[in-house]
Image (cartoon, rainbow, N blue to C red):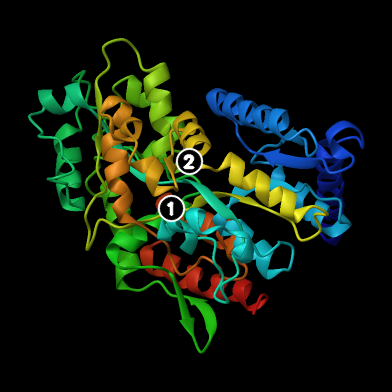
Amino acid sequence: MRRILVIAALGALVGAAALYYALRPARDGAATGHGLRFVSLAWQEETLAENRAIVAEWNAAHPGTPVEYVQATWNSVHDYLITAFETGDVPDVFHYESSVIVDFAARGFLTDLAPMIDPEMKADIMDVAWASVTRPDGQVSGVPFLMESLIGLYNEDLLREAGVQPPTFARPWTWSDMRAAAIRLTADTTGDGTVDRWGAAIGLRNSGNIVMNLSIGFGGSFFRKEGGRYVVRVGPEERELLSTLYDMIYRDRSTAPSGVGQSGPGMIPGFFAGKYAMLVGIGAWSRQQLVVNAPPRFHWGLIPPLKARTQNAGTSAQTLSIPKSSKHPAEAMEFIRFILNRRNMARLALADWMLPARKSCLALPEFNSAAGGWDVTTASSVFLSTGPWLGAPGYVEWKSRVANPVLQEFFSNRLGLDEAAERIEEESNVVLSRYQ
């Protein structure tokens, strides 16, 4: 067993090194002199084009400080960055997400951007976005620019046929309303005794993020501070959310059990095919898939945030950060100001179908149009919140080693709620103890 673990560890190190050298550019062109290296995680076609266009505009206007655009992927960037931090051969600016960079900052890898943020940027970016990247001592780990929010989608024709009145922003559904609608929409349309249309579907593979973000509306948070240390507790509020999701699958039998093994985006083809009348708790960026790939005459609408105790839900921000080892932090920050000015942030957000962090962008007509559901998505930004887990040392490891696997067992009906809660608390505190 020990030999297997050693081999696995060596394999991980080799893999990380391979990723690092694959993304490490040659020392020529933009990488010499005062050139900057920018690692981007853009992946949708429109967003790739906008990122490259903005970099080209910067380079045309700043020939003495050219930026080299380096394309990375969400799957590889963490290993690449850790290797870069440890060797000191870092990009000058990199794209990532708030929940991870706060941990990087705690480990001393990042430049504190607080003294470098100008008043206009500070005032225009939403407070909830700044909260996601600000440490307790006031250090700012990155500049937030895209805000992730959870939405729901419904098949307009199926709701109309079932006589279900869809929610509106002014008249939102509670979780009970949504469950009742899901029961009503679940059907055996062929008469063979088997359900072939589920009222709802929820992508619960690697469900740590969705559970954490939805728990806020129930008054939960999982993470607490006790005696100055982070601990995880599964109290009545957290249990209410978990039991609600479980009951929709196994008691109501109105929510597709296949969602336990799928992501929300992976269920979009089934949504198009009429297999699911609603998709619940999916990222707002998924609207792009509907606009581009929906079949002809497919009519859909947005479900505003569901109400439990509140309609609040957690959010994470996509960010731009500067490593502490960068030799050109002032120039890197100037590039961040450029790529995240009002005009360019709006371009990036529209291309990625996500909310811009700037309030002035949210006020633009294109973010308040009914086309593509932008009006409901933007209006729902008032419910975005941050959870107490942001900044918790070890959160990233906790999510991958505890939350995702234990919740997978629970939603697969292999653990009861009491056992799942006990395991989450015990295993979480073992992981967190190593960081505190």
Question: CA gap, disc 2 to disc 1?
Answer: 9 Å
Q: Nearer the viewer, residue 266 or 128?
A: 128
Query: At 34% from the left edge and 68% from the top edge, which residue is drawn?
Result: 220
Image x and y of residue 130, in percent: 48, 60
Image x and y of residue 139, in percent: 60, 69
Is disc 2 in contact with disc 1, using a CB cutoff of under 8 Å? Answer: yes
Task: Name which residue type carries label 1.
Answer: Asp
Is residue 415 in sight in this rendering? no
Task: Name which residue type carries label 2.
Answer: Arg
Answer few, some or many: residues within 10 Å of disc 2's Cα (few below 14, many 20 plus, some between 14 and 19): many
Q: Residue furthest bottom?
A: 227
Q: Nearer the viewer, residue 83 or 252?
A: 83
Query: At 82% from the left edge and 40% from the top edge, which residue is drawn?
Result: 35
Q: Nearer the viewer, residue 235 or 76?
A: 76
Q: Is residue 313 above or below residue 338?
A: below
The residue carrying mark 1 is 124
First in residue order: circle 2 vs circle 1: 1
Q: Is residue 207 above or below residue 268?
A: below
The quarter of the picture where residue 315 lies is: bottom left
The quarter of the picture where residue 99 lies is: bottom right
Viewport quadrant of the C terminus? bottom right
Viewport quadrant of the N terminus? bottom right
The residue carrying mark 2 is 342
Q: Is residue 41 left or right of residue 354?
A: right
Is residue 340 in sight in this rendering? yes
